[in-house]
Image (tube, helix red, strand yellow):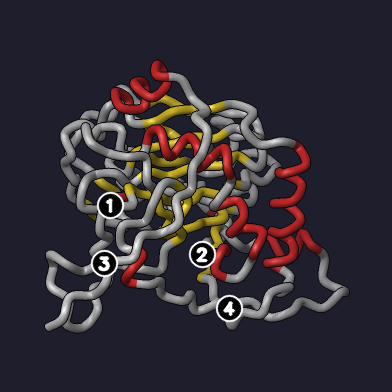
């Protein structure tokens, strides 16, 4: 078989944003908070686009256009999360490529690897609406769902609203990423607090800490970091846009195609966001222009007493 010509990809050079001390904090603890990274105007743009998506403003099978008689509130109140909004929205794709966010990612994503060159790609977006009384998600590690070859998965968590203990902010176990161990999972027995996703178990959770942040902050966290969020007990939404990235030199073996071996399987529905993409010669899978809605019923406290 003739070898495929490997043409180099465009190089995306980004200015550094965080300090060496912050990079080391991320390496040691598995997460990093950067306050005030997003402007008020940027948050307003995300909020407006959230309404456009939920009203069926983009052509997608999952969300049909909503009648003008239905309020924006009614389009939001039954949605926990919209998966892959960047597949249909150029606004969400723009924020997946946000220069400052990706500048930080070019510093921290694979900072644990001695020869990493700062190259990064994005493979997923998730827009959490999380209305009042909606559940959070039990303990888990994102790498269980999006495997990488070099432990470089990182979530970039944009706080669209203030995130507090009351409304179900991110809870983390600092340092739990270090071993590179994926904990087993089981069904949990707390459907009032957490959604249907299974929980990871087998570790000491006594060092858990809340990550309370103001709207506009970014929380970056490693794919092996144990984290969870609790039920929204406030009267307000806790909206978050979280995008997932990894070292562009890592293959993404999720959902192997026919004929691919475990060693060479590589998901190519990705966005090149920093440095170079060494696998650009493979091309990119075109998104299906669809999203997935995660509904989770709010539970009335009166019925659970």
Q: Secondary structure at mark 4?
A: loop
Question: Residue at point 51% right, 48% down?
Answer: 242
Q: Residues within 10 Å of mark 3 (few under 14, many from 20)?
A: many
Residue at numbered disc 2: 84
Q: Secondary structure at mark 1?
A: loop
Residue 50 higher or lower than 178, as above or below:
below
| Label number found at residue 249 | 1
Which numbered mark, 4 or 2, is in the foreground of this view? 2
Q: Alpha carbon of mark 3 to alpha carbon of mark 2: how far?
A: 18 Å
Q: Are marks 4 and 1 in contact (CB under 8 Å)?
A: no
Question: Residue at point 28% right, 29% down?
Answer: 205
* Sequence-first disc among 4 and 1: 4
| Label number found at residue 266 | 3
Which numbered mark, 1 or 3, is in the foreground of this view? 1
Which numbered mark, 1 or 2, is in the foreground of this view? 1
Residue 57 higher or lower than 247, as above or below:
below
Going by the image, does 262 lie left or right of 11? Answer: left
Judging depth in this view, the residue of 218 and 238 nearest the camera is 218
* Sequence-first disc among 1 and 3: 1
* Sequence-first disc among 1 and 2: 2
Q: Residues within 10 Å of mark 1 (few under 14, many from 20)?
A: many
* Sequence-first disc among 3 and 2: 2
Quadrant of the rendering where the N terminus is positioned: bottom left
Judging depth in this view, the residue of 62 and 246 nearest the camera is 246
- Can residue 130 be seen here? no
Position of residue 186 measured from the top left corner of the image (x, y, whole percent): 23, 54
| Label number found at residue 62 | 4
Q: Alpha carbon of mark 4 to alpha carbon of mark 1: how far?
A: 33 Å
Position of residue 255 measured from the top left corner of the image (x, y, whole percent): 27, 71
């Amino acid at each position: 078989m003739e070898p495929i010509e490997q043409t180099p990809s465009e190089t995306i050079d980004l200015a550094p944003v965080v300090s060496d001390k912050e990079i080391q904090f991320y390496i040691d603890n598995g997460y990093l908070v950067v306050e005030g990274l997003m402007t008020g105007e940027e948050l307003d743009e995300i909020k407006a686009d959230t309404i456009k998506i939920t009203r069926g403003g983009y052509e997608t099978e999952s969300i049909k256009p909503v009648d003008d008689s239905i309020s924006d509130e009614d389009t939001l109140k039954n949605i926990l999360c919209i998966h892959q909004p960047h597949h249909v929205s150029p606004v969400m794709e723009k924020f997946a490529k946000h220069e400052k966010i990706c500048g930080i990612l070019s510093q921290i994503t694979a900072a644990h690897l001695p020869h990493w060159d700062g190259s990064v790609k994005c493979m997923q977006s998730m827009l959490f609406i999380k209305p009042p009384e909606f559940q959070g998600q039990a303990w888990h590690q994102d790498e269980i769902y999006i495997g990488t070859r070099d432990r470089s998965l990182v979530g970039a968590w944009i706080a669209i609203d203030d995130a507090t203990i009351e409304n179900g902010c991110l809870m983390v176990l600092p340092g739990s990423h270090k071993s590179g161990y994926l904990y087993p999972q089981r069904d949990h027995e707390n459907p009032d607090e957490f959604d249907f996703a299974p929980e990871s178990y087998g570790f000491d959770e006594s060092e858990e800490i809340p990550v309370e942040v103001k709207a506009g902050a970014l929380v970056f966290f490693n794919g092996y970091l144990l984290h969870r969020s609790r039920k929204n007990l406030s009267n307000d939404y806790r909206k978050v846009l979280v995008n997932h990235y990894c070292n562009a030199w890592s293959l993404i073996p999720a959902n192997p195609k026919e004929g691919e071996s475990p060693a060479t399987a590589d998901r190519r529905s990705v966005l090149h966001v920093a440095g170079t993409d060494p696998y650009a010669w493979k091309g990119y899978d075109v998104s299906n222009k669809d999203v997935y809605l995660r509904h989770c019923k709010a539970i009335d406290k009166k019925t659970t007493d």
